[in-house]
Amino acid sequence: MTPQQDVDLAPFNTLALPGRAARYLAITAPGQLAATELAGSRRFVLGGGSNLVLTGDFDGLVLHMALQGKRLVKEDSEAYYIEAGAGESWPDFVQWTLRQGWPGLENLSLIPGTVGAAPIQNIGAYGLEVSERFHSLSAWDFKNRVLIDLDREACRFAYRDSLFKQQGWHLNGQLAIVSVVFRLPKAWTPILRYADLAQEFAARQSAAPTPLAIAAAVVAVRRRKLPDPAQTPNAGSFFHNPVVDAAGADALASRHPTLPRYLQPDGRYKLAAGWLIEQAGWKGKKLGPVGMYEKQALVLVNHGGATGTDVKRTMAAVQSDVKAAFAVELTPEPIFL
Ligand code: EPU
């Protein structure tokens, strides 16, 4: 179990940015995490690399979570409890649960990344966040050298956020998520309130909203709007949708009547970062090799040969133009290493 030296990380991040790890180890069994030589190093725990901006070389140890395995751990009158290893592919896991007849994750179809990374930024799409189907997780705590279990409440989930981001635990490699248990309620109801999905169903008049039909519709919408990282390197949405108070949203809407805004449970409004970026002139625009995608302005893409510095330059230009036009600050969604 000796780490490899000087490993190229470009194949392990979906933005295809260059960077090398001083040391690199693929973790294929949970027991490997307890090895004492891993405790003292500067670490980064890597999943699918689909929410990552590599800013250069990493002078530490990259632990690439490759833990496999998925199974039904428990079933009661209300729900199925399904456990998966952190290294399982998220989109494959979702398909597998649907094929087993355990619906509930269909709205999160085709999101790139791994099962272990899903809770870290509380992945969400088409009216569902993973926190709503999350039961618990097991993680290795490098400092205290124990395996800990965290339930849903302990994870302090919020919009694209969790305890792991709030405490900086993910970025400083303090914890490595080993496995996650999902709770999929037996009383299934379709979630079709998201406009794109409702339209897709209206267009497919004959398709009844079964879990598999919803998964297919989500896949179709995503393929239409979002670039495939294998063809056009990207990290999904590059900024959070900003949340502003009601007075701020009203002031913006009076100046920009078509402004999309969504009322949140706390009375504030979520704005559409993609709309703000498009209005600021960035849809399909490039600065050097990095631009904002022509079909979804919220997605930053590497047109070829970009470095982390190029990404930061385009990011700063977009933030500055959106701020000048709307006085709204955009914060990046990915983790910077
Ligand atoms: N819009 C524009 N121009 C654009 C893009 C969007 O005007 O170039 C407008 C749309 O017309 C719509 C609104 O912005 O009125 C929202 O757009 P969309 O439905 O495409 O969703 P989003 O808010 O841009 C979020 C998530 C996505 C998720 C979709 C679907 C965030 C940061 N992003 O995007 O998540 O797939 O909703 O639920 O919350 C990701 O996090 O990587 C991701 C892809």
Image (cartoon, rainbow, N blue to C red):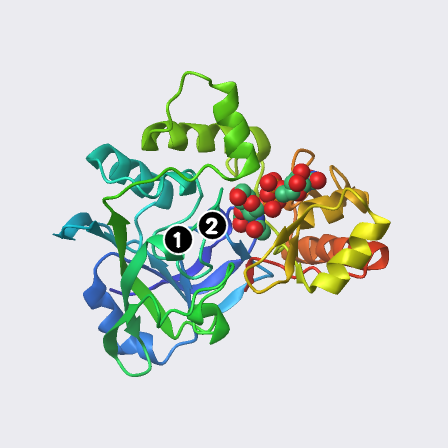
Percent x, y of residue 232: 58, 36
Percent x, y of residue 231: 55, 33
Q: Nearer the viewer, residue 168 or 62?
A: 168
Q: Secondary structure at mark 1?
A: helix
Judged left or right of residue 289, residue 21 is: left
Amino acid type shown at disc 1: Val
Quadrant containing the C terminus is bottom right
Percent x, y of residue 59: 50, 70
Q: Quadrant of ligand 1?
A: top right
- Does the Cβ of the disc 2 residue fall within 8 Å of ligand 1? yes
- Write down the residue under mark 1: 130
Residue 39 placement: quadrant: bottom left
Note whether residue 192 is visible.
Answer: yes
Instruction: Classify 293 as above or below 159.
Output: above
- Write down the residue under mark 2: 124
The answer to whether mark 1 and mark 2 are in CB contact below 8 A is yes
Q: Nearer the viewer, residue 222 or 52?
A: 222
**Mark before the other along the chain sequence, 1 or 2:** 2
Q: Nearer the viewer, residue 328 or 60?
A: 328
Judged left or right of residue 81, residue 194 is: right
